[in-house]
Each structure stands twice: as C-alpha cells, then as structure tokens.
Amino acid sequence: MIMNNLERSCGAIVFTRKEGRPLFVIVREMAGAYSFPKGHMEGNETEEETARREIFEETGLRPRFLPGFTQQDEYDLAERPGFRKRVTYFLAEFEGGTLAPRPGEIREILLLPYEQALTYFEHESTRRILAAANDFLTVVHPV
C-alpha cells in the first residue's frame, strides 16, 4: 500500500524453539539479500493480516503471533527516489510444518540461532530488530 510516497509493508520475525533455544527464520530473496518474511499491504488488510499472508506465501508457515511485540523499520527506496518504505514487524512462533520457499521470490529459507542469524543481515536496523525480538523472548517469553 502506498500513501503520500510512503510504501507500507508488514512481516514478522518468525521462530521456533529447539532444545529451549529460539531458531529464527531468515529468507534469502531472489536478489540475494537476507531478511525476514514480509511484503506489501493489499486492499483493506490490517498490518497483522498482511504479515500472516506474507509469511504463508513466502515460507508456507502459519505461525502463532506473540502479543506485545512490534518493531518498525523505515528507509528510503533506492529504486524509487522520493519514496520511503515503512515495515512493521511482529513476532511469531511456529511448531512443525515444512519450510517452503516461494518460487521466483524466495531463493532459500534458513533456520538459525540468534548469533548466527545476526551475521546474515546487511543493515544495522535489521540486526536491531532481531536483537529486540531475541531480548523479548529471553525476558518476556522464556522457555
């Protein structure tokens, strides 16, 4: 959804727990960048509806959203001068299911522990959002 030169997208930091430790879903886009599952808002979708749809489309997962966590990232779009993108992220947990990258959009899906996942991100803001999610899981929703 684009409003006043602001493009809005939504997604989530998706994770599962293995041996009491969170493992995070990292998607590698066709262009090669690593990110969280996310995408553009469509029609009258709420932010959470957009995030749910995009997670399923990009990964094949239908995770459970954890209440009390949201983060935003906002940046200029290099390919569209004068436009900014704002992405709202939720935190969502999955149990079971098969990770299925969307053909033509997602090159691969990684499932990584926090320390390793941090090393895949190019932008400091993405690392900040992952750190906030990891802190939330450690303090608010520990195993």
Image (spheres, rainbow, N blue to C red):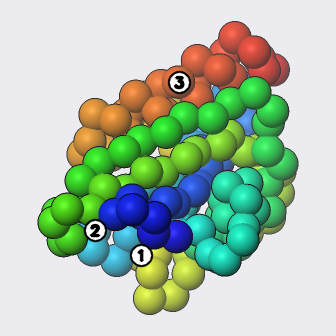
Provide the secondary structure element on which disc 1 rests.
Answer: strand
First in residue order: circle 2 vs circle 3: 2
Task: Tell me the kind of residue under disc 2.
Answer: Gly
Task: Tell me the kind of residue under disc 3.
Answer: Ala
Write down the quadrant of residue 21 in the picture.
Answer: top right
Residue annotated with mark 1:
107
Q: Is residue 79 left or right of residue 119?
A: left
Residue at the location (36% across, 45% down)? 74
CA gap, disc 2 to disc 3?
A: 24 Å
Provide the secondary structure element on which disc 3 rests.
Answer: helix
- For marks 1 and 3, give the one nearer the viewer: 3
Residue lying farthest to the bottom in this orientation: 104
Residue at the location (72% across, 67% down)? 45
The one of 55 and 32 positioned closer to us in this rendering: 55
Residue annotated with mark 3:
132
Task: Tell me the kind of residue under disc 1.
Answer: Arg
CA gap, disc 1 to disc 3?
A: 26 Å
The one of 27 and 17 positioned closer to us in this rendering: 27
Q: Are marks 1 and 2 in contact (CB under 8 Å)?
A: yes
Q: Position of residue 36 (x, y in %)?
A: 50, 53
First in residue order: circle 1 vs circle 3: 1
Residue 55 sits above or below residue 88 on the image: below
Residue annotated with mark 2:
32
Residue 34 sits above or below residue 134 on the image: below
Residue lying farthest to the front in this orientation: 4
